Amino acid sequence: MREPLKRATIFVDHAGDAMPVEFDWVQKWLARWEGKLRVAKYETGGWEHLWNVEGPEEAIKEIPPDLLCHSDWADPAP
C-alpha cells in the first residue's frame, strides 16, 4: 500500500539583493526529493518565495520549522 502524501507550504523571505541561504536550501531539498515530491504551486512576489509541496512524510519532516507557513493548502479547514 502506498504511503499517504503530506502537504506543506514553505516560505522564504527575500528582503535583500542577495539570494537568501534558505532559498538555496529549498532548491537542494527539492532536487534531493525529485520524483517523490510534487510542487503544486510556486509563487514569488519579488520579496518572498512560496512553495506548496506534497510528498512523503519523511521529506516533509526535513523542512526546518522556521520555513513552514500556515496555508489553506497545508492546513485545510475541517
Image (cartoon, rainbow, N blue to C red):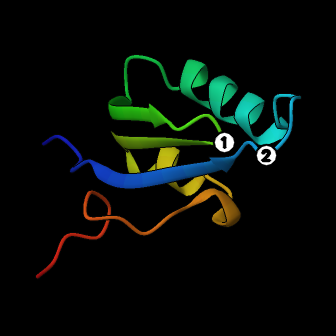
Q: Amino acid at mark 2?
A: Ala
Which one is in front, 26 or 6?
A: 26
> Which of disc 1 and disc 2 is earlier in sequence?
2
Instruction: Judge the density around disc 2: few (<14), some (14-19), many (≥20) Cα neighbours within 10 Å.
Output: few
**Residue at the image position 61 percent from the left and 34 percent from the top:** 46
Q: Residue 42: where, in percent of width, then height? A: 41, 32
**Rendered position, 36 above or below 54:** above
Q: Secondary structure at mark 1?
A: loop
Instruction: Give amino acid for label 1.
Output: Trp
Which numbered circle lies on residue 47? 1
Residue drawn at point x = 36 percent, y = 30 percent = 39
**Where is the C terminus found, in terms of image quarters?**
bottom left
Which image quadrant for residue 25?
top right
Left/right placement of residue 28 relative to residue 43 reads right
The residue tagged 2 is 15
75 versus 50 height, above or below: below
What residue is rendered at 76% in x and 28% in y? 24
Q: Residue at x 68, y 57 (%)?
A: 64
Residue ranking furthest to the bottom: 78
- Between marks 2 and 1, how big is the CA–CA gap? 5 Å
20 to the left or right of 61: right
| SS assignment at label 2 | loop
- Point out residue 37 in the picture as x, y percentages from the top left corner: 38, 30
Of residues 44 and 1, which is closer to you in this image? 44
Q: Mark 2–mark 1 contact, CB under 8 Å?
A: yes
In the rendered view of the protein, which quadrant contains the N terminus?
Answer: top left
Residue 32 appears at what percent x and percent y? 60, 22
Please state the horizontal and vertical placement of residue 72, each as a whole percent of the image.
25, 64
